[in-house]
Image: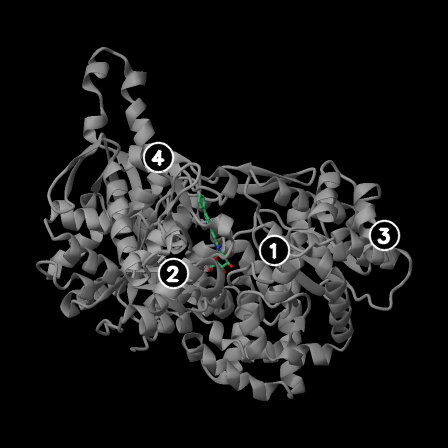
Amino acid sequence: MTHVSPVCATPTEIEFELVGNLARSRGTTVESASPQDLYQALALTVRDHLVDRYIRTTEAHYAANPRFVYYLSAEYLLGRQLGQNLLYTGTADVARSALEALGVDPADVAALDIEPGLGNGGLGRLAACLLDALATHDIPAVGYGIRYDFGIFKQAFQEGAQHERPDDWAYYGNPWEFPAPDDQQRVGFYGSTEPGEGGRGTWTPGEVVLGEPSHMLVPGYGTGTVNIVRLWRARAARESFDLSLFSAGQYGEAVEAIVREEKISKVLYPDDSTELGRELRLKQQYFLVACSLRDIIRRYRLRNDGWDAFADKVVIQLNDTHPVIAIPELMRILVDEEGLEWSKAWSITQRVFAYTCHTLLPEALETWPVWLLRRLLPRHLEIIFLINHLFLQQVERLHPGEPERLRLLSIIEEGGEQRVRMAHLAVIGSFAVNGVAALHSRLLTETTLRAFADVLPHHFHNVTNGISPRRFLLVANPGLTRLVSQRLGGSEWLRDLDRLAELESAVGDPDFRAKWQAVKRRNRQELAQYALTATGVSLDPDALCDVMIKRFHEYKRQVLRVLHVIVLYHRIKRGDLAGVVPRSIVFGGKAAPGYHAAKRVMRLANVVAGVVNADPDVAPYLKVAFLPDYNVTRAELIIPAADLSEQISMAGKEASGTSNMKLALNGALTIGTLDGANVEIRDRVGAENFFLFGLDAADAAALRAGPYNPRSYYEQDYELKAAIDAITGGPFAFDGGDILVGDLLGYDEYLTLADFRSYTDCQDEVARVWRDQDEWTRRAILNVARSGFFSSDRTIRDYCRDIWRAVPVPPKEA
Ligand code: 26Q
């Protein structure tokens, strides 16, 4: 790996380039430039510093003709680009000086940077962290995705309830994007098929839409590699312009087809299990897949002939089931269009795809009605049926006379409406399947995908998720980054996070601990300042900053967090202060718009925040800030300030979690269950530095399986009873509160009441340790020192070694 020294410009040079870009791309001067002009021109200036590297990267790739990793994902949460790219090109300081020399406040320009919110949550941010690590380690890779015009909705609260607004993130243009209209692809939908010989068929689509790509640069840190993420946008094909209608003056009717076709990339679907089965969503998935596969084949053909080398030069990672229609699409291309034998095509296909599963919840496994596929993608459905038939035949030969086994394995779900199980198609059509944390991968083979683990045992892997230390330390937490760099000597550790282990020797150093505490306090101050302007809540920068940031979902149990806040409130009100330390409770997260149960919890959190924050009796001890519109930008502000990381899902439900890693690496201690990657965090940081509570996955499953009576916990625990009663009749009553309480006392699907006492007692232990600031800081430092494993660089190493067989191709130095 080459280490590129990033400093490559002086303030005067940057100033010169900036003024030039203002003139050439915005047609204006410094004196008359608007803030938007300045932002766009600065972005172009920084971008120019990456383009040389990008060109050298493509040259190195062309020369080496290496194996490429193609990451297919319906979602990317890349975060803001300006700060990152300034740091990766080493132009941050010079750009600041240049702006100041021009009389411009750098903060005003930075505030205009866009966040492409092209994802929902963990899965989308993981894709961005993996791309960052791929580039940082010089792995030839391209990310493929959809360029939604509207990203994840913007969240606001009205009387505590979530309101959604559209996110037109590129309204003023996206300066980080390079359009490539010459690489357009044609994508068919609907239509009819005709059978041919040997499994072949001919598909005549009834509608053709164009996919137009643009790409954003994905720079590596400390290396010359710049990869790309290629995003597709739908454009109506010329033939969609209905000339007869047009000449008849029926302009409205004439453009209807265009509007319908361009709708495909209009909006990101917010994750919502109740809204599945929507045709447009399936169209998006196929659109992404058809465009990307065509592009992958085009790229392959630049340096290779025939199909024999395809599976050596190409590996395609499927980010969950969303792009799994790629499997029958590649079969269709190889068999129908390229004329390969079915068995040859199948062998190529199975060697090309690998699939990452991100869930354990059976209800979250994607299925599509057979009738819908038949209508939208008739040829793909035929291919899926044939894949299924041949696979089940093979199983039948190995395990004759076991119809139940066949039923469990089949791609087609029978009984009622026939549906296609995309996860089954993914497992059958790929050479590797991985879960995203050790526990998750084990449970996948024991429960959710058990039937497949029996017949394809060598398919299954674990690749524990990781996060980009560049994004979540260097960009988000400059204070801590500086402190660590001082101690370790230089910033090389940002590419080799195991080196954080060297911090262990610093825990005993009072001077280092004091500096650590000062960094944390400064970060809490900055968060407090933001919280005040965003919500009017004033947080005490010396209070324990207690953070829960993630999508609102019942299994994640934000309601457990709120119940404990009510307990604290009650204790403070009655003067029972023995276990109370001043705390700032911080929430961030969105709920899918149609997910009413999650929205009730959100409402409750806001109601509790309102009462608590208005009560002068509790003000010295407790504040609750629910920061609206949680996104990557907000994460970068909240995470560095956090002291306590809430990872309290019902054990066995969270596949991995990644905020747990981000928070641990920023020096927060975790309070958590043995779920997802919490297990591995605890193994590494040491049980004594982790606040563990609650049922484990086996206990939880056993309790769920037997008769479970949540009401008995309520009746036997006066603090729990008081907290719940305060929602039905007391100060925290709200419209919907009765339903929420009814759910808890009636079913309590996620065992919140069963874990309540253990959680509350564990929080008392948190408070006890917090009182000893030296001890707390010691534990925080150890958490960071021992969390190097959770770098996405390690994740990429695991993928490269166990799944991708990909090796670095560093570009030549400039
Ligand atoms: C599916 C169909 C229709 C519309 C939307 C969706 C959809 C969209 C997004 C379904 C799921 C998602 C996102 C899932 C997700 O973010 N999962 C999380 O992935 C993280 C990265 O592996 C894990 O850390 C989390 O545990 C997991 O919940």
Disc number lying in front (4 or 1): 4
The Cα–Cα distance between marks 2 and 3, rounded to whole angstroms, is 59 Å
The answer as to whether callout 4 falls within 8 Å of ligand 1 is no
The Cα–Cα distance between marks 2 and 1, rounded to whole angstroms, is 28 Å
What secondary structure is marked by label 1?
Answer: helix
Q: What residue type is disc 4 on?
A: Leu
Specify the farthest residue to the right: 574
The answer as to whether callout 2 falls within 8 Å of ligand 1 is no
Which mark, residue 616? 3
Reading the image, the residue beneath label 4 is 372
Image check: 263 left or right of 468? left
Estimate how packed mark 4 is, as few (under 14), some (14 to 19) or many (20 or more) residues with alpha carbons within 10 Å: some
Residue 138 at x, y percent in the picture = 29, 70
The tally of labels here is: 4
The Cα–Cα distance between marks 4 and 3, rounded to whole angstroms, is 58 Å
- Which numbered disc flags the more N-terminal residue, 2 or 4? 4
What secondary structure is marked by label 3?
Answer: loop
Q: What residue type is disc 1 on?
A: Lys
Screen quadrant of the C terminus: bottom left
The Cα–Cα distance between marks 2 and 4, rounded to whole angstroms, is 26 Å
Residue 434 at x, y percent in the picture = 40, 64
Which mark, residue 556? 1
Disc number lying in front (2 or 1): 2
